[in-house]
Image (cartoon, helix red, strand yellow):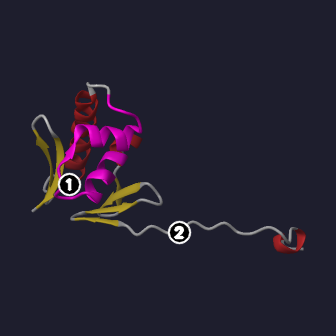
Amino acid sequence: MNMLEKYPDFHKYELEKELPLSLPGLEIYPDKRKIYRDRREIHLTVKEYDLLCLLVYNQGRVLTYEQIYQKVWGEEPFGKESNAIGCHIRNLREKLFQASPNTPFNIRCVREVGYCLETE
């Protein structure tokens, strides 16, 4: 007896498959929360991953510290969010550089405003 015969009201729940994000040199799979460079996984923390995805979704657009904090931390900014964001961005840049020193993109700091992901 298979599952549907045993439980006729049971319905298989399927999530929509998200398409990979495109960024030169990286493969980003949002539905798996994984990032690869040349088929090698880059291990990021939850916040680093969320920051990268937010920047990729908004390529070329300057995101303010407040916008980043609200989206990634899910709370209202309290005035010192630039320090927390800066620390995570620094770690993210370091991990991306280690995986690929010659990446054709850059996470640019816009002094006293926020960050922007730019591609060459």
Is residue 28 in the magenta section? Answer: no
Q: Where does residue 59 sit, x and y in percent of width and height?
A: 21, 58
How far is mark 1 from mark 2, CA to CA? 31 Å
Q: Quadrant of the C terminus?
A: bottom left
Q: Where does residue 68 sit, x and y in percent of width and height?
A: 29, 42
Which image quadrant for residue 3?
bottom right
Q: Is residue 72 above or below residue 7?
A: above
Q: Is residue 10 above or below residue 59?
A: below
Q: Is residue 11 above or below residue 107?
A: below
Residue at the disc numbered 1: 100
Residue under the point 30% across and 50% down: 52
Q: Looking at the image, is mark 1 or mark 2 earlier in the sequence? A: 2
Q: Where does residue 107 sit, x and y in percent of width and height?
A: 17, 48
Label 2 sits on what residue type?
A: Glu
Q: Quadrant of the N terminus?
A: bottom right
Does the magenta stretch mainly form a helix, a strand or a loop?
helix
- In this rendering, does residue 45 appear at all? no
Label 1 sits on what residue type?
A: Ser
Residue at the disc numbered 2: 16
Q: Which residues are magenta?
A: 50-77
Say which of marks 1 and 2 sits in front.
2
Residue under the point 32% across and 26% down: 78
Mark 2 Cα shell of 10 Å, populated few (<14), some (14-19), many (≥20): few
Q: Nearer the viewer, residue 103 or 88?
A: 88
Q: Nearer the viewer, residue 82 or 94?
A: 82
